[in-house]
Amino acid sequence: MNRDSLIQKWLDNNLSPEERKAFEQLEDYNILIQMQETLMSFKAPEFSVDKNYEELKPKLQIKKSQQNWLKPLLRLAAVLAICFSVYYYTTTLDTKFDTQIANRTDIELPDNSEVVLNSNSSLVFNESNWSKNRTVTLNGEAFFKVAKGEKFDVVTESGTVSVLGTQFNVKQRINYFEVVCYEGLVGVKTKEEYVKLHPGESIKIIDGKLLADEKETATQPSWLRGESNFKETPLKHVIAELENYYNLDITVDDADKMRVFTGSFTHKNLDLALQSITIPLNLSYSKSGTSIVLKRE
Amino acid sequence: MNQPLQDHICNEQLFERLYKKHSKNLHDFLYYKFGDRLNPRDKVQDAFIKLWQNCGKIAPDKAKSFLFTTANNLMLNAAAHQKVVLKFEKLPQKTATNQSPEFILQEKEYHKKLQNALANLTEAQRVAFLMNRVEGKRFKEIAAILDISTKAVEKRIYGALKKLREDIEGL
């Protein structure tokens, strides 16, 4: 056993009894022991684990509770703020319905009033204040079954229709405005005048001219049954209406667009619909792709 | 001690166990490395407070190295790094009182020499050496505390011993 490895073992507190004897025989034994004894005076001050932990504890609580409180609270507040703003935004937002060509939608309003929105039309209303302000904005054609309640307004470009609880049809297309009352009482206010419609009465303004109309006997607008009905209506409005049901581009070649048409066409069969319009007017039509040309026979 | 599979230490019992396991070793480590001038006890407490504040981010098996690194940095930040002056306390207590004044003087002188020699060791050597000699820790235990190999501990301690003897005898 050499000197170095004995010292190593001594350092590691790992001497066997024999090795210890050998170690004690070493010439530097006394020097090492003297150093060892003196070194003990450099011992680190007593660190009382339990006492120090008790001292630490209250400090931990403060720091921890600060963290525990504030951060989740701020997070919660942020989430709530976002929820509230989304809620506020969505409830005050206008609700909008759109229909494409040859489509229609049944809409139930917040007070259970029913609206059937005809093709190529849009209806906008605001749900948030519905019980006090029953106003819808209409662009196109729709049939209304209004539940009893406060005044119900249908705002269109051509005029406002106000009612109390009734069934009526509003049709507002380019240069064409028609209101038919089926039940109850409807007030129609246009730029020029204010008209009250009783059941069966209608008002029609075409190209700015007010047209007197016969009594309506049907209980529902014909388009709800998949048909469009016309009485002495200029051809161009009939064609415009046709384009609302069929995705087509219709041009009228050397035929009188202002000629009046009385009759109806179906929404379900293009050829049948074209025939219903062209035959009574002595016209013919030719089809190529999505464009159709009407000609005099 | 096997820790359960947890990814954080935000649990008071677990934290207390960590404190009991590491606080004394950490304190001794700081003391032998930096002396008592910078109040190692406070640094231990601060390091544990920091550990608690970050408890959610630290896995149990990383706690020890977090504590040692944090405490070490706290020490380094506490004062610009100066030459360590170890103000070790109390002289060796001798039970025998019938010693000649000359002997006592010699003894005092030796103590002073040893103190200077210790201050001249590298920090790494001093920490390992005093943990071994004064705290009576085996090489293996020191290796675990300092996260180094047993061989490295052995080298540091043996190197420290050699250097101390040279210093004391050379003067």
Image: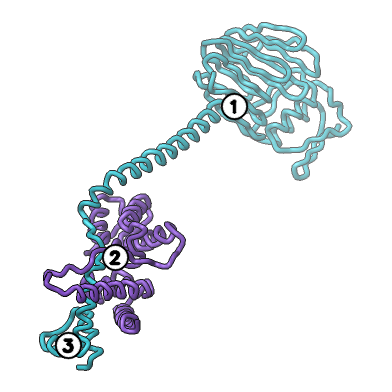
Chain colours: A cyan, B purple
Residue depicted at 70% across the width and 38% down the height: A247
Which quarter of the image is occupied by the N terminus of chain A?
A: bottom left
Residue A80 is situated, as x and y percent measured from the top left of the image, at 45, 34
Residue A250 percent location from the top left of the image: 78, 35
Residue A33 against residue B39 in the figure, above or below:
below
Say which element carries label 2: loop
- Name the mark on residue A94: 1
Amino acid bearing label 3 = Phe
The residue sitting at 78% across, 18% down in the picture is A206
Residue under pointer 2: B88
Label 3 vs label 2, nearer the camera: 2
Circle 3 is placed at which residue position? A23
Look at the numbered discs 1 and 2 and tell me whether their residues touch, using CB distance below 8 Å.
no
Q: Residues within 10 Å of mark 1 (few under 14, many from 20)?
A: some
Name the front one of labels 1 and 2: 2
Is B125 rendered above or below residue A224?
A: below
